[in-house]
Amino acid sequence: MLFVVSLVPLLPTEVTLLGMGVAAAQGGTSLALVIAVASAGCLASDQALYALGRFGGRAALDRLSRRKKIAAGLGWLDGRLQRHPRPVLVVARWLPSGGTLGALLAGSLRWPMAEFFAASAIGVTLWTSYVAFLGYAGGRIVTEPGISMLLSLGVALVLGSVITYGVRRSARAL
């Protein structure tokens, strides 16, 4: 189930991964297995999105950019991908829809596949590890699964908001 959720860009991967981290903390599964499965699903998804971007994704990006928040994210990514492609793709994973938009954009910009794959592999591994560890920490701190999930989700939302705020602030400064 985690692989399928990680594979489909619009499904709630972060929430599912947090829950699996909680389950790992409480002995339901291996944390390493959770990270590996989620990373494999996200990596496969990124490669499919890259291919979509490479073979006609510019039209999809144009349609997506009609939405104000997505247009802002695309603007931030596009400007930085030109200057610092690998680090930006790694960081984009932490932004709402950043991994999806980054993969589509990299494909539409015709990045070399090997470079995209390497950046994507690093980004998804770091991101899935971060989210799974948040769930794991919540599951170790509080043994009640529902409360530990809410605690982990709350921390993830706060950290995600701080990162998004920092990105938006740096985008305005340019």
Image (spheres, rainbow, N blue to C red):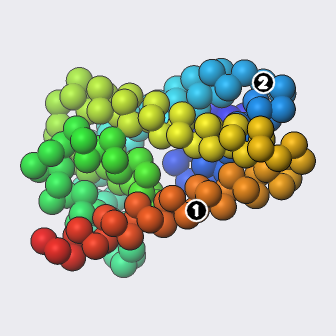
Instruction: Using the rendered view, name the quadrant where residue 74 is placed.
Output: bottom left
Check disc 1 and report its element: helix, strand or loop. helix
The front one of 113 and 154 is: 154
**84 relative to 39 in the view: left or right:** left
Instruction: State the image coordinates of residue 23 (x, y, percent, origin top left).
Output: 79, 35
**77 relative to 79 in the view: left or right:** right
Q: Which residue is mark 2?
A: 29
Instruction: State the image coordinates of residue 1 (x, y, percent, origin top left).
Output: 72, 34
Going from N to C along the chain, the mark reached first, 1 or 2, is: 2
Q: Which residue is mark 1?
A: 157
Task: Indicate whether 54 appears above or below 121.
Answer: below
Check disc 2 and report its element: helix, strand or loop. loop
Q: Residue at x 82, y 47 (%)?
A: 142
Q: Residue at x 24, y 63 (%)?
A: 76
**Can the viewer see residue 63 in this picture?**
no
Instruction: Using the rendered view, name the quadrant where residue 118 is placed.
Output: top left
Farthest residue, direction right: 144
Instruction: Give the crowd class for mark 2: few <14, some 14-19, many >=20 residues within 10 Å.
Output: some
Instruction: State the image coordinates of residue 147 (x, y, percent, origin top left).
Output: 83, 55
Instruction: Using the rendered view, name the quadrant where residue 158 is placed.
Output: bottom right
Task: Indicate whether 93 appears above or below 64.
Answer: above
**88 relative to 99 in the view: left or right:** left
